[in-house]
Image (tube, rainbow, N blue to C red):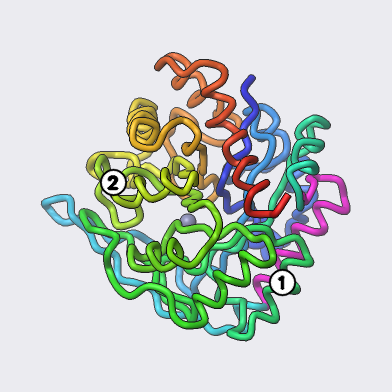
Amino acid sequence: MNLVFDGHNDVLLRLWRGRHAGSDPVVEFSEGAREGHIDGPRARAGGLTGGLCAIYIPSMKEFALQEAGPDGHYNTPMEAPLQRGSSLDIALDMAAIALRLDRAGAWRLCRSTGEIRNAMRDGVFAAVLHMEGCEAIDAELVALEVFHAAGLRSLGPVWSRHNIFGHGVPFAYPMSPDTGPGLTDVGFDLVRACNRLGIVIDLAHITEKGFWDVAKTSDQPLVASHSNAHALTPVARNLTDRQLDAIRERRGLVGLNYAVTMLRPDARDNPDTPLSDMVRHIDYLVERMGIDCVALGSDFDGATIPAAIGDASGNQMLVDALSNAGYDDDALAKICRENWLRIFASAWHE
Ligand SMILES: [Zn+2]
């Protein structure tokens, strides 16, 4: 089995919601859940040895894609910016769940590539704390230092909405990612602070202007943890050829998003999506950037994924499809885990 370190999941959101409904996150993760995509047993079954686990602040109303028109087009209205106070409460809640799972031995919260490799060797899920949209962080970046001390090693300045650091892209098809302004002044401060502290800056969800603002400011490889090729699926969340070329030049990485809306040529939210759509995006990314810059970023527990994979236990279906498409062991090792570990070693100043 090809062990996978995955670049994006929302399992903390699911566990946080479950806790509010009365379930124990430690029990739900260790013993398994009927719902969602990731827990310990299903991760082991699918060779999912670890991943970037997102602290993500949901909006007050349930997110839903806009219904497509007769031409298949849609443009989901952007959500309103969130309040900082309530966002911080939720972010602390999710970080506490991550720490509790670590203390209970349900997973290991990793802060270095050595810790990730040890967890992988020991067969314990290697969780790395990520923040998807920094609504919980203040302009003075005080909370950033505290979250870093709690294990935060990766963040995206914005999700698909606006905040004090910058602007996100909407869920829209077809649409260019150049949908608005980029980083704000404090957004530039955030990027420099991440460089200093050793926190990966994730370019998923940011506008194209924001992407170039980070590119000209950050000294890290450029990373989009869960995005695909705009040339194949022209949603605003996917990356244009120019962006992919910049990621290649900076020896960065793109993690393949399993979200069907970002894989299918028609961008529809339809789980009946063949594995060949995933292989096609991987082929395109590898052709454009080389094998060292392509990885996985499933979006487990955060999106509709192909029924052929189903949940974390089906993760090897993609690996097998890639193997059948001609990727050898060396290439698969890079896509499945080694490229992510190379990025971490660089961004974390190892
Ligand atoms: Zn996302």
Quarter of the image with the N terminus in it:
top right
Indicate the secondary structure of the residue bearing disc 1: helix
- Judged by its main secondary structure, the magenta piece is helix
Residue 10 vertical placement versus 295 (above, below): below
Any atom of ligand 1 within 8 Å of the CB at mark 1? Answer: no
Left or right of 295, for residue 136? right
Give the percent coordinates (x, y) of residue 159.
Answer: 46, 66
- Percent position of residue 283, x then y: 36, 29
**55 versus 25 height, above or below:** below
Q: Badge 1: how crowded within 10 Å, few (<14), some, or many (20+)?
A: some
* 1 or 2: mark nearer the eye: 2
Give the amino acid at mark 1: Leu
Q: Is residue 91 magenta?
A: yes
Write the residue at 55% across / 77% down. 189
CA gap, disc 1 and disc 2: 37 Å
Between 52 and 286, the residue placed more toward the observer is 286
Q: Residues within 10 Å of mark 2 (few under 14, many from 20)?
A: some
> Is 157 part of what is drawn in magenta?
no
Magenta-tinted stretch? 89-110
Residue topped by disc 2: 241
Helix or strand or loop: what does disc 2 sit on? helix
- Between disc 1 and disc 2, whose residue precedes? 1
Looking at the image, how many numbered discs can be counted on the residues? 2
Q: Which mark is residue 92?
A: 1
Residue flagged by tag 2: what amino acid is it?
Asp
Q: Kindly identify the residue that appears in the image at 42 percent across and 61 percent down.
A: 205
Residue at 69 percent across and 66 percent down: it is 197
